[in-house]
Image (cartoon, rainbow, N blue to C red):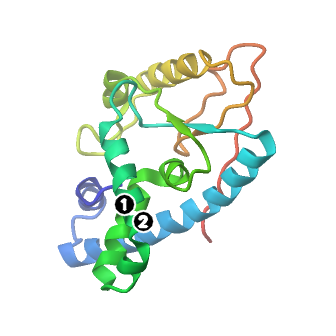
Amino acid sequence: MEMGPFYTDQCNQNQAFDKHLISLSYSRHRDDVSSFQQRQREILIELIEKYDLDSLYQARLVVGDTKEFDKRVSIRKSIQQRLPEIESTSQTSAHGQLSVDLSIGNSGQFLVDQIIKQVHPFEDATLLAVANPMKSGQFRIDEQAYEARENFIIEQMLKSDDQVMILICGRGSDFSDNIPQGVELKRIEIPVKE
């Protein structure tokens, strides 16, 4: 989550929060996300190797509009090529590198590391926007909008001939009622840091 939505969410939850406390909270949140992504990375690598996969499916990537994601992956590739130079500079540069890493997630980092060849987008921009739980400025889930979004995602994935597909999505997604008969769904939840 970017700082803007995080700030709004924290203010809505606790009016007494000031900018300094929210900044500290956001820093902890980013550390938690980084730790979560490390655990996710280990599981994904194991699955990619087990099923000999060369692509992943990523939630929040819109069909026909991956310019921002592609740009961030390109930036990360550039950083990777200049890594020795960056590691010898200030903490600010290292923090900037972390920002890019978190913004592309493991799927983007796997592209950079050439672990996979492709990340498939499968979101519809309108359905994604309507299902956004923060669209009103406060966290509210629209069940019908979520179902429409999940149906579209599954329809897009089933267009593939792949026998095994990995979908990286948020913890709140539940595709069990969107999967047609004859398709097996296995959900792997990444354990939350204790």
158 to 116, vertically: above or below: above
- Give the Cα separation between the discs numbered 2 and 1: 5 Å
At x 64%, y 22%, the residue is 177
Helix, strand or loop status at disc 2: helix
* Residue indicated by mark 1: 78
Residue 130 x %, y %: 32, 27
At x 36%, y 35%, the residue is 66
User: Badge 1 local density, few (<14 within 10 Å), some, or many (20+)?
Assistant: few
User: Badge 2 local density, few (<14 within 10 Å), some, or many (20+)?
Assistant: few
Q: Amino acid at mark 2?
A: Gln
Q: Is residue 31 left or right of residue 72?
A: right
Helix, strand or loop status at disc 1: helix
173 to 63, vertically: above or below: below
Q: Is residue 164 left or right of residue 129?
A: right
- Quadrant of the image occupied by residue 123: top left
Outermost residue toward the left in this view: 19
Residue 81 x %, y %: 42, 65
Residue 138 x %, y %: 28, 45
Q: Nearer the viewer, residue 148 or 184?
A: 184
Is residue 128 visible in this depiction of the protein? yes
Q: Is residue 7 left or right of residue 181?
A: left
* Residue indicated by mark 2: 81
Residue 161 x %, y %: 68, 18
Q: Amino acid at mark 1?
A: Ser
At x 36%, y 51%, the residue is 74
Quadrant in which the N terminus is drawn? bottom left
